[in-house]
Image (cartoon, rainbow, N blue to C red):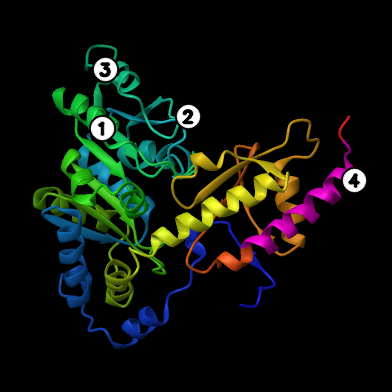
Amino acid sequence: MRVPDIIDLRSDTVTKPTPAMRQAMATCEVGDDVFGDDPTVIELEKLAAEMAGTEASLWCPTGTMANQVSIAAHTVPGREVIAGTGSHIVNYELGGVAWNSQCQLHMVPDDGGWLEPEAVKGAFRKEDMHAPGTGLLCLENTHNRRGGRVFPVEVLRACAEEAHRRGVPVHLDGARIWNASVASGVPVPEYSSMVDSLMFCLSKGLCSPAGSMLCGTSRFIERARRLRKRFGGGLRQAGVLAACGLVSLTQMIDRLAEDHVKAKELAKAVKEAGILEIDPETVDTNICIFTPRAGTKWSVTEFASEARKEGLLVTFMADKNIRMVTHNDFSMEWIEPTVERAKRSMSRLDENRPAG
C-alpha cells in the first residue's frame, strides 16, 4: 500500500465515508425528518435503540448537540452538573452547559481516565438557601482526553448507583462506546442499563460523515426531540446521512478492534524510537497520548507544526500532550513512516533548541 503524502492522525473523525456508505446515500429512501416521516432515519433510530438496549433513540447531527440536548432534557436552570475535569462536556463544548441549560459545572478529577466513586460521592450537593443542588451526573466512556481509557464497568456502576440513590439522573457521553465495548467485552446494553441516557457517535471510528445517536426511554427521547429542534438540529431529508449510520452499525463495529491494535503498535514504535513518552499498556483503544521526553526544550505546538511540514498531522492537548488517533483510513503499514516523520520533526526541533 502506497504511503500517502499526508498521514492524518488528528482524530478518527477524519475518516471518509466507505463505498458502501456512498452507495447507501445515493439510493436510500428519504422523507422529512422534522415531520417525522423520513423512513431511513426511522430505521436507524429503531436499530440504534435495539443495539443500545434502550426504548428509543434520536439521531442528532453531532455528538456535542446530543450531549447538550441530553443535559437540557435532564435538568432545570440553576442546577449543578457533575462532570470530569478532562471531559468533553467541560473542555470542548463551548460552555454549553451554562449557555444552553443555565446550569453550572461541578468538576471532579478524572486523571486516570474515569471518575472515582468516592470523589463523585463528595460532589453531590442538596439544594438549600446557598447551594444549587445537583441535577445531573455526566460520565464519559471512552475518555478522549485521557487516552481513550475504558471506564471500568464496576466503577461506572458504582458512580451511577450513587447518583440514583440520591435521585440524580446520569448521562453517559459514550462518543466511542463501541470502542469501549469491543475492547472490554462489555455489551453496550449493559452500559446503558446503568444510566438514564447514552450518546454515541457514528462519525468517529464508525466512519459516518456526520451524526450521533442519543438513547434513552421513550419519554426522555420525546423531550429530547423537542429540544433538538430548539437547538436548530431539525434536519429535513436527514436520511441521506442516516443511511451511513445504518452502515456504521451493521458493518463497522467489529473492525474497531483493528484500530486498537494499530494504536498499541504505534505507541510501542514511537516509544522504542525514543521520540516521545508513553506507556503502551495504558492504550486501551484507538487513542495515543504522548508526552515530550524529560528535558525537551520545544513545545507540543512546535512539534505539531514541524510534523505538519513532514506530512504528519497530529493534535496537541493542554499544551503538554500530543495526541494521535488510529482509524479505518490509517493502515498498519504506515506506522513505520509515521515514526520516521516524527523522528525528522523532533530532530529539527532538537537542533534548534538543544537540551541543556
Report whether residue 135 is seen. Answer: no
Q: Position of residue 92 (x, y in %)?
A: 47, 44
For marks 1 and 4, give the one nearer the viewer. 1
For marks 3 and 2, give the one nearer the viewer. 2
Q: Is residue 145 above or below residue 334?
A: above
Q: Residue furthest bottom?
A: 27
**Which amino acid type is shown beneath numbered disc 4?**
Glu
Region in magenta: 335-354
**Which amino acid type is shown beneath numbered disc 3?**
Arg
Q: Tell me if label 2 and label 4 are in contact, CB under 8 Å.
A: no
CA separation in Å, label 1 and label 3 = 24 Å
Of residues 78 and 252, the one drawn nearer to the viewer in this rendering: 252
Q: Residues within 10 Å of mark 4 (few under 14, many from 20)?
A: few
Q: Is residue 143 above or below residue 111?
A: below
Numbered label attached to residue 154? 1
Image point (49%, 44%), residue name: 283
Indicate yes or no whether the magenta region holds residue 342.
yes
Tell me the residue that label 2 is attached to.
111
CA separation in Å, label 1 and label 4 = 48 Å
CA separation in Å, label 2 and label 4 = 33 Å
Image point (28%, 66%), residue name: 249
Write down the quadrant of residue 350 in the picture.
top right
Q: Tell me if label 4 and label 3 are in contact, CB under 8 Å.
A: no
Q: Which of disc 2 and disc 3 is earlier in sequence?
A: 2
CA separation in Å, label 4 and label 3 = 53 Å
Q: Which of disc 4 and disc 1 is earlier in sequence?
A: 1
Q: Position of residue 110 (x, y in %)?
A: 43, 29
Tell me the residue that label 4 is attached to.
351
Write down the quadrant of residue 301 in the picture.
top right
Write down the quadrant of residue 85 in the picture.
top left
Q: Which of disc 2 and disc 1 is earlier in sequence?
A: 2
Tell me the residue that label 3 is attached to.
125
